[in-house]
């Protein structure tokens, strides 16, 4: 196709060349980037300009199909894209410049890798002829990002650019999702080459993830499940990754089998918190019933979770008497930390479909057989492991989350978090009813994730209520994105559980380091209300339990970005807790957690393991 | 390349490793594209696996395929992880544990050969002895003058190591080894 029309005014409305999806044609590298993004269904991207991506920014300026959100720090762009991806099931797209632009996005890439979030990150690079010469703002982007991406490419030939971007989307979104980086030197952005539309034929042959599970293994799993007296379903983030259908099937399976279900931090919402078989989250800060049931079960069905160390505790004491079934799309997740009896390789949606169908056809749950198990679970539930002492004068952090949950119940709500005690309380006390409503940094535990993630969610769901449940320390890590939220009219709510401490760090120091609170007090705290106002947002604060409901309602009804400084009890700790080096049935519970019990909880050996 | 053996269990609740490490030879078929070797090596160093030996070369030019042969020592669980982790690398087509495969085929171990160039200098008795031993080991002289020989020797690792240790007192000055090339016996391909 001739380049006529390239400079015609019609291009601004997207009517010109790039409209012709599905055809081969000549374009510049920068045009190819935009065309490839559009052909892969991209509507929004998050980025920050610089010398090495200016040709792409120039193209962005001349089209309307893709909305670009200008961030204030590239890490923010990465987390926004993560929030966008997790709440929509679509890949998040990031555009940053070479050198510092690329290095700033590394934290978000690793975060996405650990939590299996699909991201496509396009980085500018110095011109090919200068690569290796320590040119201005040069860095070895593919080298730096190799271990924190699922795959990455340096594009040296403009004619390969389109194919690589299409492949980038395929790899980011299929199999176990993850982040990918496409590094595009500036001369490649300027060069003219052939655009090839997305096509399944040209895909890299060595990457063909398997989605259908082995039916024989599914049958064997069903046999095991049908014979169980003390079964448990342990589900995780893989169910969310697999899509809405997978959550639906999980609910059906629970209904059909009558099995109790727990979930990891990453899987919350796949099964509704109001469901009768729900036992709450498991793991280090999970409920007593979930952890005890994991320990004592005879058959464990792990669905899209990865036996993380926050779950297993001491490996040699992890669910010692159970047969284990594990469904996962990544062969390296199966038998990694814990040996399983049946490993089913495949996509959760596909495998659960078979499992539900086969169970329906062949099995009837003998509910009476499960009665003693449920009776035991009810006894464990009776311990009320999430109990806390209410307070009339000081807002308890748990209470704040409970109120936030109650007052947003019938709204279209999405929750993100930062990292710390507030994150755990959010997981414990905010009941999630649907998948994709809960965005948190689980694997990397990145403070600073929650606020940009919330902005990303809000970009995808303009009319929804999006709340970042934050800590006073974490929020200061990406606070600059207030400016972004204000610029794009994104009415995100930052709900800070302000305890004046890095509470999670302080809790560990109390448990492990003789209560020596080394550098965990948040000194010189900013005035969050004034800070919000300085950015052009709305600042609020509340320190009385009696005022909390009204204040939360005011926050919800404010159609602008809000920072809500919720002053909570400063020394509250997060229980239950399985101390390091301990087994599931040795957890610390709130009422048992007297000073003495806490002090003796972790012996010297456990301390070394932390 | 010389990362010490570490179990891959959790970094936090790590139990002492009780299983015994084994040495296995892996064949990895990869697309011959930039960075593929860095991905494989980065995986080993990043996850704390051992590389005892590594060789790589393009084997099918038309199909742009290279074959990487890695000898690694790890416990059986970790060996499984290494294979799965290698398979996760996008340009990796196939990973075959030649050691396991050879056992399945009823053999002791896969065929393994290495090539070494060994430079020895000296005069008089030592020089004569070096040449005589080289002959016994079927090493070829590929370069020589009155002060030195360069021997080319091919064979099992043990043979090469033996040859090198014998040459050491006879004036050995330089060694270059290729690392191991390996495949299984019999008519079947990888
Ligand atoms: C301060 C702090 C405390 C924490 N405490 C806890 C705690 O108490 N409890 C807890 O649960 N977590 C806790 N976490 C989180 C924890 O670190 C892990 O991130 C989390 O447990 C991992 O969740 P997951 O096992 O569901 O795996 P994910 O990281 O979500 O991995 C998903 C798994 O599913 C697989 N998968 C992906 N897509 C598919 C598909 N389509 N089909 C099949 N399989 C698929 C993947 O291969 C992977 O194995 C904490 C984190 C922090 C920061
Ligand atoms: C980027 C980063 N640095 C350090 C840590 C270690 N860390 C985990 S929780 C925490 C304290 C968080 O404090 P705050 O945000 O106030 O939350 P709180 O625990 O008080 O609710 C720290 C420092 C981390 N997770 N991320
Ligand atoms: Mg705090």
Image (cartoon, coloured by chain):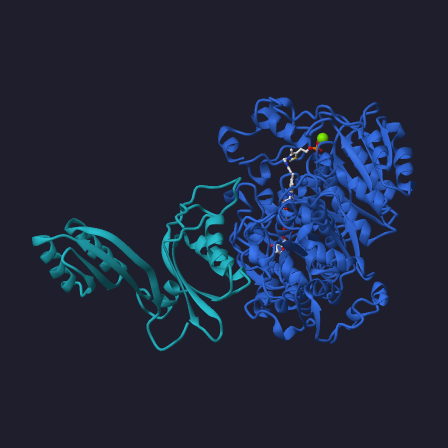
Chain colours: A blue, B cyan
Up the image or down, A574 lies above or below A158; here it is above
Q: Splitting the image into 4 quarters, where does residue A30 fall? A: bottom right
Residue B47, visible in the rendered structure: no
Above or below residue A208? Residue B118 is above
The single residue placed furthest to the left in the displayed view is: B125
Residue A121 is situated, as x and y percent measured from the top left of the image, at: 67, 55
Q: Is residue A306 above or below residue A72?
A: below
Q: Is residue A119 left or right of residue A603?
A: right
Residue A296 or B108: which is nearer the viewer? B108
Residue at coordinates 26% horizontally, 59% vertically from top-left? B117
Out of B183 and B148, give the one closest to the viewer: B148
Q: Position of residue A84 (x, y in %)?
A: 75, 53
Is B55 left or right of B34, judged from the image as shown? Answer: left
Q: Say which quadrant the N terminus of chain A sits in.
A: bottom right
The residue under the point 55% across, 62% down is B90
Estimate the x, y position of residue A487 in percent, counting from the top left: 84, 45
Residue under the image location 52 percent in, 33 percent down: A606
Q: Position of residue B47 (x, y in %)?
A: 49, 49
Q: Report how many numbered discs are placed on residues in the image.
A: 0
Left or right: B41, with A515 as reference point: left
In the rendered image, the quadrant that contains the C terminus of chain A is top right
Quarter-of-image position of residue A598:
top right
Decide which of A519, A222 is in the foreground and name it.
A519
- The answer to whether one can see residue B154 in this image is yes
Q: Quadrant of ligand 3?
A: top right
């Amino acid at each position: 196709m001739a380049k006529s029309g390239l400079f015609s005014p019609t291009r601004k409305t997207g009517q010109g060349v790039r409209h012709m999806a599905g055809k081969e044609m000549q374009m510049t590298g920068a045009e190819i980037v935009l065309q490839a993004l559009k052909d892969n269904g991209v509507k929004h991207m998050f980025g920050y300009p610089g010398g090495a991506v200016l040709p792409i920014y120039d193209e962005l300026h001349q089209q309307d199909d893709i909305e670009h959100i200008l961030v204030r720090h590239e890490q923010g762009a990465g987390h926004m894209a993560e929030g966008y991806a997790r709440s929509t099931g679509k890949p998040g797209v990031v555009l940053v410049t070479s050198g510092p632009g690329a290095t700033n996005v590394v934290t978000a890439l690793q975060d996405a890798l650990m939590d299996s979030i699909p991201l496509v990150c396009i980085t500018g690079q110095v011109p090919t002829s200068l690569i290796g010469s320590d040119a201005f703002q040069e860095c070895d982007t593919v080298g730096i990002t190799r271990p924190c991406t699922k795959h990455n490419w340096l594009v040296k030939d403009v004619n390969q650019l389109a194919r690589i971007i299409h492949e980038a989307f395929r790899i980011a979104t299929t199999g176990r999702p993850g982040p990918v980086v496409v590094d595009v030197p500036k001369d490649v952005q300027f060069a003219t080459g052939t655009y090839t539309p997305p096509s399944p034929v040209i895909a890299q042959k060595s990457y063909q993830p398997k989605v259908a599970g082995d039916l024989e293994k599914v049958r064997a799993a069903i046999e095991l499940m049908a014979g169980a007296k003390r079964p448990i379903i342990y589900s995780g983030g893989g169910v969310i990754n697999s899509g809405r259908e997978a959550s639906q099937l999980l609910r059906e399976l629970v209904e059909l089998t009558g099995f109790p279900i727990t979930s990891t931090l990453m899987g919350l919402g796949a099964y509704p918190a109001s469901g009768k078989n729900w036992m709450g989250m498991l793991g280090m800060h999970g409920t007593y019933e979930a952890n005890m049931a994991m320990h004592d079960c005879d058959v464990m069905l792990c669905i899209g979770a990865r036996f993380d160390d926050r779950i297993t505790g001491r490996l040699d004491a992890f669910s010692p008497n159970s047969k284990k079934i594990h469904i996962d799309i990544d062969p390296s997740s199966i038998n990694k930390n814990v040996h399983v009896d049946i490993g089913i390789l495949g996509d959760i949606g596909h495998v659960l479909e078979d499992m539900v169908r086969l169970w329906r056809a062949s099995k009837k749950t003998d509910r009476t057989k499960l009665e003693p198990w449920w009776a035991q679970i009810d006894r464990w539930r009776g311990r009320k492991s999430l109990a806390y002492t209410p307070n009339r004068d000081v807002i308890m952090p748990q209470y704040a989350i409970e109120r936030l949950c109650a007052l947003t119940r019938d709204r279209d709500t999405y929750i993100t978090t930062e990292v710390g005690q507030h994150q755990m309380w959010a997981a414990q006390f905010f009941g999630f009813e649907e998948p994709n409503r809960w965005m948190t940094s689980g694997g990397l535990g990145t403070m600073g994730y929650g606020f940009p993630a919330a902005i990303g969610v809000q970009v995808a769901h303009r009319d929804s209520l999006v709340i970042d449940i934050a800590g006073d320390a974490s929020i200061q890590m990406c606070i600059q994105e207030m400016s972004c939220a204000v610029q794009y009219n994104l009415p995100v709510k930052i709900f800070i559980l302000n305890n004046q401490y890095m509470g999670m760090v302080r809790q560990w120091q109390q448990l492990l380091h003789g209560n020596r609170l080394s550098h965990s007090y948040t000194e010189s705290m900013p005035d969050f209300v004034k800070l919000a106002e300085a950015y052009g947002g709305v600042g609020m604060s509340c320190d009385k339990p009696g005022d909390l409901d009204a204040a939360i309602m005011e926050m919800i009804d404010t159609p602008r970005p809000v920072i809500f400084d919720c002053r909570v009890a400063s020394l509250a700790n997060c229980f239950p807790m399985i101390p390091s080096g301990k087994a599931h049935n040795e957890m610390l519970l709130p009422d048992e957690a007297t000073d003495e019990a806490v002090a003796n909880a972790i012996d010297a050996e456990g301390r070394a393991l932390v | 390349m010389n990362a010490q053996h570490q179990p891959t269990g959790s970094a936090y609740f790590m139990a002492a490793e009780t299983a015994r490490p084994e040495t296995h030879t892996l064949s990895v078929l990869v697309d011959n594209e930039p960075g593929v070797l860095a991905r494989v090596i980065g995986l080993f160093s990043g996850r704390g696996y051992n590389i005892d030996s590594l060789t790589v070369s393009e084997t099918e030019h038309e199909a742009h395929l290279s074959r990487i042969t890695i000898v690694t020592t790890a416990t059986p669980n970790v060996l499984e992880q290494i294979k799965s982790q290698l398979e996760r690398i996008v340009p990796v087509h196939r990973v075959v544990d030649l050691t396991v495969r050879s056992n399945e085929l009823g053999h002791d171990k896969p065929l393994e050969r290495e090539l070494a160039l060994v430079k020895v200098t000296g005069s008089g008795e030592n020089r004569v002895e070096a040449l005589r031993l080289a002959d016994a080991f079927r090493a070829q002289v590929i370069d020589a003058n009155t002060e030195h020989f360069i021997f080319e020797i091919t064979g099992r690792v043990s043979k090469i190591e033996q040859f090198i240790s014998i040459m050491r007192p006879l004036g050995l000055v330089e060694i270059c080894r290729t690392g191991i090339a390996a495949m299984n016996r019999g008519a079947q391909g990888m």
